[in-house]
Image (spheres, rainbow, N blue to C red):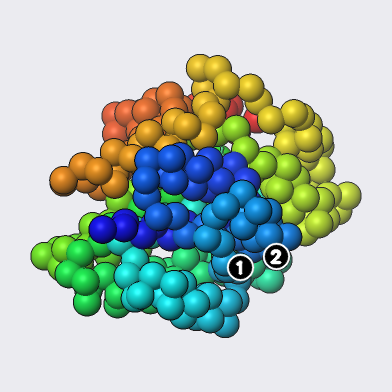
Amino acid sequence: MKTYVLITGCSSGIGKHCALRLREEGYHVIATARQLEDVISLKEEGFVAFQLDLNSSESIQTTLEQILEHTQGNIDILFNNGAYGQPGAVEDLTRDVLKAQFECNFFGTVELTNEVIKIMRQQGKGRIVMNSSVLGFVAMKYRGAYNASKYALEGITDTYRLELKGSGVDMVLIEPGPIESQFRKNALNAFKQNINIEQSAHKLSYTAVLDRLGNEAPKSGDFTLPPEAVYKALKQALESPKPKARYYVTLPTYLFGFLKRVLPTRWLDSILSRSSG
Ligand SMILES: NC(=O)c1ccc[n+]([C@@H]2O[C@H](COP(=O)([O-])OP(=O)(O)OC[C@H]3O[C@@H](n4cnc5c(N)ncnc54)[C@H](OP(=O)(O)O)[C@@H]3O)[C@@H](O)[C@H]2O)c1
């Protein structure tokens, strides 16, 4: 029996790595990517690949139909991975920029999930893994749009878990800290494109944001880990008979998870403020 795994955002980073590793393990991976050229590359690498843009309901509906044709109506696992980070102080976010962040990271992800739940309910089983973030439960300066989208994802996943109890469909959150990927590069593009740096009250602090995002992706060390770290958590989430609600990945996630439980908010704020870069 094939185990079908549908993954969003497979053009790079965590999605691409997990697609490769799950395929090695014998899963039948359906890799999706937002842009056609990435779908072509994935196909050249031997993947069953489809174009899926989370910003578009039409793309979600049409692609899912094509995928179900390929899988004879089955999806065993959904890994909701595709997302991006929109940097910038909250007061510099226009309504449209904030909406765009939610279109991808939240509304598109939830729309796809709801469609897949219909299939999993018919199957009587399934597992859905949300790639959230440490920034899904602690806030940092200049990450407000991303913070809000991942907090929203965490909130709705907690609700899903309650509503799906007894259905055979498990909902799991993975909460990575810094991981080597294209995330910073893509965030830098979104920052330059959508934030009026010159007119901002945060203009001076933005120099540090530009430096941080413009630097080479940090190399693996104590704080930043390669995508394999997320893959290990994903594998546990998929293969455990009773998966945990949340899987922490990286030291910062463990650290902030602990500090959030024990510190008063103002104390935590002061640490987060200094860690925001
Ligand atoms: N890297 C980190 O430090 C880190 C930490 C915590 C959580 N995460 C989470 O990990 C996940 C993967 O990110 P990553 O680190 O692997 O970054 P990445 O290399 O930038 O990969 C992000 C993927 O999401 C895709 N994506 C963006 N907008 C999309 C849309 N509208 N529809 C479909 N796919 C879209 C990107 O496609 P394009 O190439 O076409 O843009 C790319 O394939 C995200 O959910 C992110 O929030 C990352």
Q: Nearer the viewer, residue 267 or 2?
A: 2
The type of residue carrying mark 2 is: Leu
Q: Position of residue 112 (x, y in %)?
A: 44, 71
The residue identified by callout 2 is 36
Q: Can you tell which mark lies on residue 34?
A: none
Q: Nearer the viewer, residue 180 or 157?
A: 180
The answer to whether the residue labelled 2 contacts the one labelled 1, judged by CB atoms less than 8 Å apart, is: yes
Q: Nearer the viewer, residue 98 or 130?
A: 130
**Quadrant location, the N terminus:** bottom left
**Quadrant location, the C terminus:** top right
Residue occupying image coordinates x 31% and y 56%: 3
Q: Secondary structure at mark 1?
A: strand
Residue 211 visible here: yes
Q: Which residue is at the far left?
A: 166
The residue identified by callout 1 is 51
The type of residue carrying mark 1 is: Gln
Residue 80 visible here: no
Residue occupying image coordinates x 47% and y 65%: 109
* Label 1, residues with CA under 10 Å away: few <14, some 14-19, many ≥20: many
2 or 1: tag closer to the N-terminus = 2
123 up-or-down from 11: above or below: below
- The answer to which image quadrant residue 184 occupies is top right
Q: Position of residue 43 (x, y in %)?
A: 62, 57
- The answer to which image quadrant residue 117 occupies is bottom left
25 up-or-down from 156: above or below: above
Q: Determine whether, in the image, residue 171 is placed left or right of residue 25.
A: left
Q: Nearer the viewer, residue 275 or 136?
A: 136
